[in-house]
Amino acid sequence: MELLVRQQLIDAPGFLDAPIYRKAWCASEWHGPAVLHVDPRKSVDASVLAIKYRLSSREIESRKLFGHEWEAVEQRLAEEEAIIAADGADPSIQEPQPQRNDDNPDDNKGDTK
């Protein structure tokens, strides 16, 4: 990082002036924009597992997947759920169920009626 500061590719005020500033700059986490995913479901499943097995945090995964701060997402979800509940609806999100195709018997193999 020092090389980048000296070449003026990164503006880091105080970096070259005092060790405490240099330490602060080097301890910072840098986040780029969220990455687009070919299969978002797999990306979310991988993030859930990383959080479950304590390999990552909600904050890190929220930033990585969507570019948002986790606390802001949680606050907004609470607000939305309160609005939905006030309307008398169930604010919980249900897992989508596989669609049955009664017109095509091949799609229903193994079904017992």
Image (cartoon, rainbow, N blue to C red):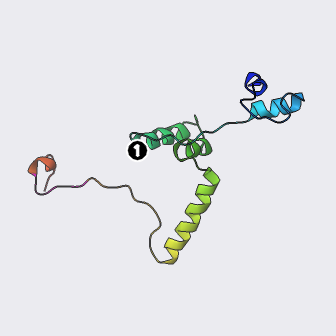
The image quarter containing residue 4 is top right
**Residue found at the far top of this picture:** 3
Q: Residue at x 15, y 48 (%)?
A: 107
Could you tell me which secondary element the residue under label 1 belongs to?
A: helix
> Position of 15 compared to 30: left or right?
right
Q: Residue 109: horizontal and vertical position, in percent? A: 13, 46
The image quarter containing residue 1 is top right
* Quadrant (top left, top right, bottom left, bottom right) of the C terminus: bottom left
Choose between 35 and 102: the one closer to the eye: 35
Residue span colored magenta: 99-104
> Where 62 falls versus 77 (above or below)?
above
Q: Residue 2: horizontal and vertical position, in percent? A: 77, 23
> Position of 19 compared to 50: left or right?
right
Choose between 71 and 30: the one closer to the eye: 30
Q: Residue at x 54, y 36 (%)?
A: 53
- Total numbered circles: 1
Q: Residue at x 55, y 61 (%)?
A: 77
Magenta-span inclusion, residue 100: yes
Choose between 26 and 61: the one closer to the eye: 26
Magenta-span inclusion, residue 66: no
> Where 99 falls versus 44 (above or below)?
below
Which secondary structure is most common in the magenta stretch? loop
**Residue found at the far bottom of this picture:** 87
Question: Mark 1 Cα within 10 Å, few/some/many (few <14, many 20+)?
Answer: few
> Where 94 falls versus 4 (above or below)?
below
**Residue found at the far front of this picture:** 8
Q: Residue at x 15, y 46 (%)?
A: 110
Q: Which residue is mark 1?
A: 41
The image quarter containing residue 79 is bottom right
Kind of residue sitting beneath label 1: Arg
Q: Residue 108: horizontal and vertical position, in percent? A: 15, 50
> Position of 93 compared to 67: left or right?
left
